[in-house]
Amino acid sequence: MPDFQTLLIYVIPLIFAITIHEVAHGWVANQRGDSTAKMLGRLTLNPVKHIDPVGTLLVPAVLFFTGSPFLFGWAKPVPINFNALKSPKQDMILVALAGPISNFIMALFWLFILSFTLNTSNQLLFEMAKFGIAINLVLGVFNLLPLPPLDGSRVVTALLPNYLAYQYNKLEHYGLYILLGLLFLGVFEYVVLPIVNTLQYAMFALI
């Protein structure tokens, strides 16, 4: 069974990754006219406010304690009222991209930590930084997939004519099942991971 130190290596970057991802959505929405997330107290880095019992606790715990080669999870989505945005179509894109962009920025932050640890003997921080880079790249790339309710689908919705967007968003009712099917067929292994590995290689080349 993994020890407590190993748990820290994975849990801390994961909690930060999913928390900041959601805060980024809410912060941009607030800047563009929708204060829903702010009124509900979701513009905070306190992870307790963003915990989803299944996505933040159960799924990562099961993956961790079963010795899964990867750790994954999600936070409670920040509520967005797209009709309250100043320019709903255009702002929907900004709000949707805020989450993945925050993950890519965090990956760069962990890269800085990683480069710092190269001159030290802090193995714990080194491993944490490596996982921080990986999980943020995975979340960033994965959420850009154009499948409702992932962030990429919001971008597609904003770009489609209204009647097509309406039909497209009907997929959200089946999104989880479609996603599980695509994961079973290898979309994670053959689409997400190659992109993540390419980005990691490019980032590691910087140090």
Image (spheres, helix red, strand yellow):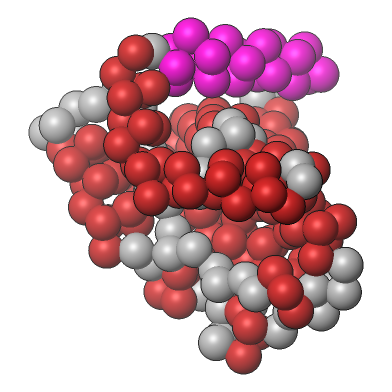
Q: Position of residue 3 (x, y in %)?
A: 20, 39
Q: Main secondary structure of the magenta part?
A: helix
Q: Is residue 10 visible?
A: no
Quarter placement of the N terminus:
top left
Image: 197 above or below 75: above
Q: Identify the magenta region.
A: 187-207
Image: 94 above or below 190: below
Q: Position of residue 110 (x, y in %)?
A: 65, 39
| Apparent side of residue 183 relative to residue 59 in the rendered image (left or right) | right
Quarter placement of the C terminus:
top right
Front one among 82 and 162: 162
| Apparent side of residue 117 relative to residue 88 in the rendered image (left or right) | left
Quarter of image, res 175: top left
Q: Residue at position x 44%, y 59% from top?
A: 75
Q: Position of residue 114 (x, y in %)?
A: 65, 31
Q: Residue at position x 56%, y 78% from top?
A: 42
Image: 193 above or below 153: above
> Number of callouts in the render?
0
Q: Is residue 53 visible?
A: yes
Quarter of image, res 70: top left
Q: Residue furthest bottom?
A: 39
| Apparent side of residue 95 relative to residue 171 in the rendered image (left or right) | right
Q: Position of residue 78 (x, y in %)?
A: 55, 68
Q: Residue at position x 51%, y 44% from top?
A: 148
**Magenta highlight on residue 193:** yes
Front one among 161 and 7: 161
Q: Residue at position x 31%, y 24% from top?
A: 181
